[in-house]
Image: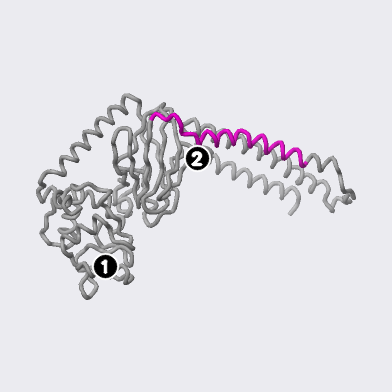
Amino acid sequence: MSKKGLLGSLGAAALLLWAGGAAAGFGELNMRPGVTPISHDVYHLHMAILWVCVAIGVVVFGTMFISILRHRKSRGAVAAQFHESTLIEILWTIIPFVILVSIAIPATKTLIAMENPSDADLTIKVTGYQWRWRYDYPDSGISFFSNLSTPQDEIDNKAPKGKEYLLQVDHPLVLPINKKVRFLTTGNDVIHSWWVPALGWKKDAIPGYINESWARIEKPGTYRGQCAELCGKGHGFMPIVVVAKTEADYAKWVKEQKLAMAQAAEAATKTWSRKELMAHGEKVYTTTCAACHQATGTGVPGVFPPLAAGHPFAASDALLKPLRERGFLDESGKVVMGPLEDHIQIVLHGIPGSAMQAFGGQLNDADLAAVITYERNSFGNTTGDVVQPADVAAAR
């Protein structure tokens, strides 16, 4: 290829790359400026270092390409014979040193600021579960789980995917703006990672360990994120939604949540009708159990047992043995609905050594009573059992 042809090809490739970048929008490819002081510092630091790297690249590669073109063999160039230039060695040592120090100073200041959650106005405890988040507000006594709320039909490709596909939750984390919020992040089962890009950082949620971080959100809005640590089958189904409100709206929300918690406590003391239990149990099952046992109750072969009556289940002896001993599998390896008392205990305390979690600390008595009633009277199961919150409370 001739020199003109080579330069033309390079120019066309550069033009295509530029056009593609412009079409996608460079803002979508870059780091977000965010809505917190830390996120702004991180963004500006990132951009400054990026342009330093661009300048270095232009100088180094520009010099290299010019040298290659002007001093190539076809032009009769003869290589110069020289070595041991003290000046060049000093320059290529001092210049990188100055560049690195100029980058390290602002980077260190930002890292120190990120790790300083002192003098917080509000504390939030974030706990990662498979596969949902729990938020506790120690200052106001509020506590709730945040579950994926994307319609199952969208996940199963039975309906068009919405704009916020897999980024919707039933209970978002609500925070006040212009307040320093301290986050205490931990895990309940495996390692998760709490990440909202607009806040400018992410923190691992490690069982038995608490990581600290903080944020001061500057403007109201809804900010979305996801678990950023591979945490099992449902890793892609535990989004994070943060809703920032003005101080007045946040105070109003706190009152509403306290009222809702009081109503939930009252609901755990009443006697529910079978119809109420089945309707509420279906909601609890969809948000809490369907990720493993599937919406149809057919489970996942070899891992999560089916709940559908007569459905076969083949797995390791370690998993089959406790199910068989408790009467939830017949001799042919098909599912049967075992004794009610054992069913309650399994949901409350899980099955040690298996993927079945203990939900006694995740759901209240009314939720547990409803979901157990639903499971025993759905998916082909016709036990007719009705479980009341008082039965679950006694089983605890």
**Magenta highlight on residue 26:** no
Crowdedness near tag 1: few (<14), some (14–19) or many (≥20) residues, C-alpha within 10 Å: some
Q: Where does the image place residue 39, in percent across and percent down from the top left?
A: 50, 34
The magenta stretch spans which residues? 92-121
Q: Is residue 7 left or right of residue 227?
A: right
Q: Residue at x 34, y 63 (%)?
A: 353
Q: Where does the image place residue 263, in percent across and percent down from the top left?
A: 18, 37
The residue under label 2 is 28
Front position in the image: 359 or 47: 359
**Magenta highlight on residue 119:** yes
Q: Is residue 9 left or right of residue 232?
A: right
Q: Vertically, is 292 above or below 241?
A: below
Crowdedness near tag 2: few (<14), some (14–19) or many (≥20) residues, C-alpha within 10 Å: few
The residue under label 1 is 322
Q: Where does the image place residue 125, in percent across and percent down from the top left?
A: 37, 40
Q: Residue at x 9, y 48 (%)?
A: 273
Looking at the image, the residue that sits furthest to the bottom is: 332
Front position in the image: 370 or 2: 370
Q: How many marks?
A: 2
Q: Residue at x 35, y 52 (%)?
A: 130
Residue type (three-letter) at the residue carrying disc 1: Pro
Front position in the image: 228 or 59: 228
Residue type (three-letter) at the residue carrying disc 2: Glu
Q: Residue at x 63, y 47 (%)?
A: 13
Q: Vertically, is 357 above or below 24?
A: below
Sequence-wise, the earlier of marks 2 and 1 is 2
By secondary structure, the bulk of the magenta-drawn segment is best described as: helix
The N terminus lies in which quarter of the figure? bottom right
Q: Disc 2 to disc 1, how far (Cα)?
A: 50 Å
What colouring does the structure picture have?
A: one colour
